[in-house]
Amino acid sequence: MSISNNYAIKRIRDAFSEKLWKERQKIQTFIWSDRYQFLSEIGRGSQSKIFLVRHRQLGEYRAVKCISKNTDTSWQIREAKLLNHLKHPRIPIVYDVEEDENFYYIIEEYVEGESLEALMLQSSFLTQSFIYETIWEISEVLSYLHHIAPVPVIYQDLKAEHVILGKKGVKLIDFGIATYLNETGCRFQNYGTPEYTAPEKRELAKINVGTDIYSLGKLLGQLVLAGNEKSLSLLCISQKATHPMESQRYHSIEEFQKALRRAKENMQSEKNPVNQKHLLKTIIVAGSRPGTGVTHIAVSLTQYLNSHHVPAVYEEKNPSNDMRKTVKSGKHFAECNGLYRRGDFLGLPLYGEGVEISVKEESVSVKDWGNNLERAREEKGDLFLLVAGSREWERDSAKTSVNSLSEEIDLILISNYGDKRQARQYAKEFCKPVYCFPLDKDPFKAGKEKDRFFGMLLQREGGDDYKRNTYKNRWHCREHKGERHNPFGRIFGKLRIIWTFGKKRIY
């Protein structure tokens, strides 16, 4: 590239930076300098920009919507006035509306979280209990809107994109086309998302409480179909709420909620592995020494359980802070309610004392204790996985750890790095089954070898309930390879293992 081209690019960059600086200075001179600290731009639309700021005295984060007066601002000011009239914990707060010569400024509560639309892409997290709780919280917001005195409010634009799941639960955003019931001359009666819009609203521009109930039923149906469990009770509610004939639907949000409560009772009695109590509730993973791959195996196990529709959460119990380092180094994590998600993985970093993060009761806890065997020994768990390295300098620590723990704990020994030869030696020396974890590059991704490994381990060690409910008709055991189709192979496999190792087996 020539010198002249470099000079031209520098001039363009300088001009662009100067334009942004001047624009920011205009805004700062009015509102930022005294009360708020400007942080960043977090969004923009065709007629507005949204900035993240921090209140200087209170230290609270807030969102400021900056709207140019050169555009039609009436509908956005109307939305701000409507929100200012609404007082509900699941509706964003509008703190103030100000203006200068060029802009209107709407100061709102900063809603941090993930949209339900984004979460729907991960079916392993859409359990029946999650769907029920989410729809119930949304119905509470609609019930509040429908009973506001003296005139109820119809939200009109319910869809997954407008539902945010944050640390404080569900938040309903974007009240741009919300309207008061029987409001005349309101052009917003013709607006909405066609997929969620009731037939009478599309054809006659008629809105009432049934408009929101129809949209809620549509959202419920989408969640059930996107999830890993298909609840007939919830689907029936969705079908009635979205009936083409208005008279055949629920007549109020309270009637919808009664049906939802009955569905919850039915779901508890349905035969479903997630609704039944797992024998496995807590899995402890610890290492005989540092660097044996405890975190890698714990993360892989969490990913495997979630991908097989068993809700699981990785919990960092050691002070290494490896999880936060991984989150900072990568761009594929989403934060929700203090938990970090990537694909089928869901993890809880070590926050320290005084910080409480809620985890769903039905989730299996995979606790990573690193090489802190003393603390891991005190933890009560259903499975205790001891990870040992296969290198020469790691063998003594493995022997010491097994001898110190095996008298008190029925531990499961895992030999890492895919070294089957060393795993066989461990099996002979300790007279117990040893599982050989395969070589693996990425703990967040599924693989045939890893799936076979965890399937075999959980089928053998997870208990009768876990085998029956979760791994029925699956064959992962290496010594029974080909058992379903070849009885001679099964007999040969058993004889080979007995001949080679006696009762000391390697998996």
Image (cartoon, helix red, strand yellow):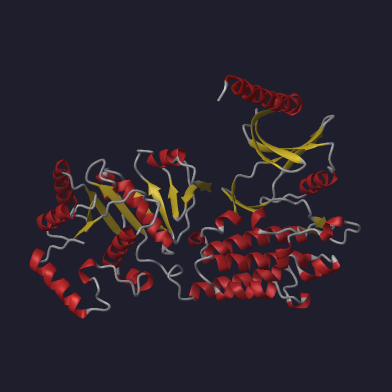
Q: Which residue is more in the foreground, 422 or 130?
A: 422
Left or right, 29 with respect to 424, comes to right
Q: Is residue 2 above or below residue 321?
A: above
Q: Residue at x 85, y 43 (%)?
A: 72
Residue drawn 56% across and 59% down?
Answer: 120
Locate the C terminus and report the quarter of the image it occupies.
Answer: bottom left
Q: Position of residue 122 (x, y in %)?
A: 51, 58
Residue 453 image position (x, y, % from top left): 29, 60
Q: Looking at the image, is 156 positioned above or below residue 496?
A: above
Q: Quadrant of the N terminus?
A: top right
Residue 198 is drawn in which quadrant?
bottom right
Q: Residue furthest right?
A: 185
* Residue occupying the far front of the picture: 2
What residue is shown at x 76% (from left), y 48% (from top)? 83
Q: Position of residue 460 (x, y in %)?
A: 26, 67
Task: Find residue 411 and report its horizontal and vertical position in percent.
Answer: 22, 56
Q: Please say whether residue 149 is visible from this viewpoint.
A: no
In the image, 141: left or right of 438? right
Picture mark count: 0
Front residue of 67 and 354: 67
Q: Is residue 40 left or right of residue 82?
A: left
- Specify the quadrant of the image occupied by residue 244: bottom right
Q: Is residue 333 above or below residue 266?
A: above
Question: Which residue is depicted at the point 52% across and 62% down?
Answer: 126
